[in-house]
Amino acid sequence: MGDYYLIGRKLSHSYSPEIHKRLWGGAYGLLELEPEELPQFFARRQFKAINVTIPYKKCTLPYLDEIGETAKRVGSVNTVVKRPDGTLFGDNTDLYGFNSMLAGAGISLAGKHILILGSGGASLTALLSATDAGASAVSVVSRTPQGEGQITYNEAYRRQSTQVIINTTPVGMYPNAGTSPIDLSRFPQLEAAVDMIYNPLRTAFLLQAESLAVKTAGGLQMLVCQGEKAAKLFGVTDVRDGAAVCREMRRDLLNWVLIGMPGSGKTMVGRQLAADSGRPFVDIDDAITERAGMPCNDYLRQYGEDVFRDLEAEVTREICAKTGQVIACGGGTPLRKDNRTALQSNGAVLWLQRDTDKLARSGRPLSENADLASMAAARYPYYALCSDFTAYVDEDWHRLQCAVLSAFRSY
């Protein structure tokens, strides 16, 4: 094991090694521990500094010789440093990361009516931030309220003056993406929605907020900026700005998703995008063919569209859980809400628009003999719901390719 790493119980999907590599270029590893291993781990003290994640942020406290002021306020640690004399100092950088996330999104809690979803350790970080900022009213929402000031979700909906909602629960987190802890549309004064979840990049909670045209902040910047603060506690002297690193990571992690009518050129454009960017290319129809053991057209004819759409949804969800890809969708993929959420969760979505009389029909059983103008009229509202931008397909494919590549890179 190296000098710097993260300890926790389940770490296979952690972004921390990549974050620290970008922040200061150091070697940083992952160490999964069971609860009974903690005493021996801290007795050995074979590290220079570590980060701590769930479920050990509170369990670590008894093993420390000194605790920083922020850790005392939060009631847990996420950073431990071994001093030259061998003693252990622990502190918490989550509050710094959370405040950096708010600042990066232009969200202020000062004077606001705030709902904090969840009553665990992360909830206290949000509560401290709101208190420090001078929020005018703060309620902690829990499915089983216990502490003073905690309310149920039904009571939360009666807080019609709520302006900022902060999600500190794991609801909507990978691998159970696509769900949201609360219906944001029921808060008429809502100005901002904040989610501590960083995987996926855009949770269902944040996607609904975007649809309501309110400010949003996702957990990736909190994660990166708390890492920036932790690296400084490690004693690293040359640490990059966390907000800049977050922008880089978000750019690299986002899938580039192409939607549009059958025959609009998604596969052709997608393959060239992948070649130009060095990203892997995934065609959802090809993935369905591999899963089904037969071409999509044959599967459609044999089992019908409803069965095909169920398989398509399963494959789409699995593909979109991964990051950094170019994805070409089937023409009907965005018709289902769960597919739209999956496409957007880790993706920037571009709608390729092409005149219906120029759409290719050959080999496409749903459009070979269809009224494509009517099909387009029925599908366009769904494309509009999940697209972040559009591009018009004409005969100048080089110009189109340049425009699409530029759009994704600048998103």
Image (tube, rainbow, N blue to C red):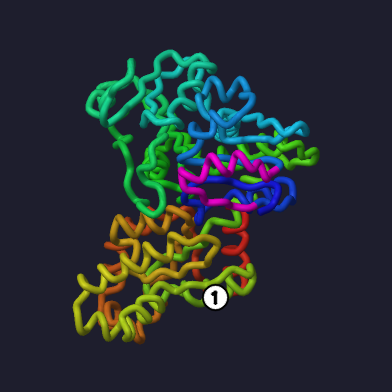
* Magenta-span inclusion, residue 44: yes
> Who is closer to the viewer here, 188 or 295?
295
Residue drawn at x 63%, y 70% is: 278
Q: Which amino acid does label 1 sit on?
A: Arg
Residue furthest to the right in view is 237
Residue 106 appears in the picture as rendered: no
Which element is circle 1 on?
helix
Q: Quadrant of the N terminus?
A: bottom right
In percent of width and height, residue 13 lies at 50, 55
Q: How many marks?
A: 1
Q: In this view, does 246 lie to the left or right of 367?
A: right
Query: Would you name the residue on which mark 1 appears?
Result: 271
Task: Using the image, determine if residue 136 lies above or below residue 191.
Answer: above
> In the rendered structure, which segment of residues is drawn in magenta?
29-47
Residue drawn at x 37%, y 65% is: 316
Task: Using the image, determine if residue 7 lies above or below residue 352.
Answer: above
Q: In this view, does 393 lie to the left or right of 376?
A: right
In percent of width and height, residue 159 lies at 29, 21
In percent of width and height, residue 56 lies at 49, 38
> Who is closer to the viewer here, 273 or 128?
128
Residue drawn at x 48%, y 75% is: 267
Task: Using the image, determine if residue 410 lies above or below residue 324.
Answer: above
Q: Is residue 33 left or right of residue 167?
A: right
Q: In this view, does 188 lie to the left or right of 5?
A: left
Residue drawn at x 79%, y 41% is: 238
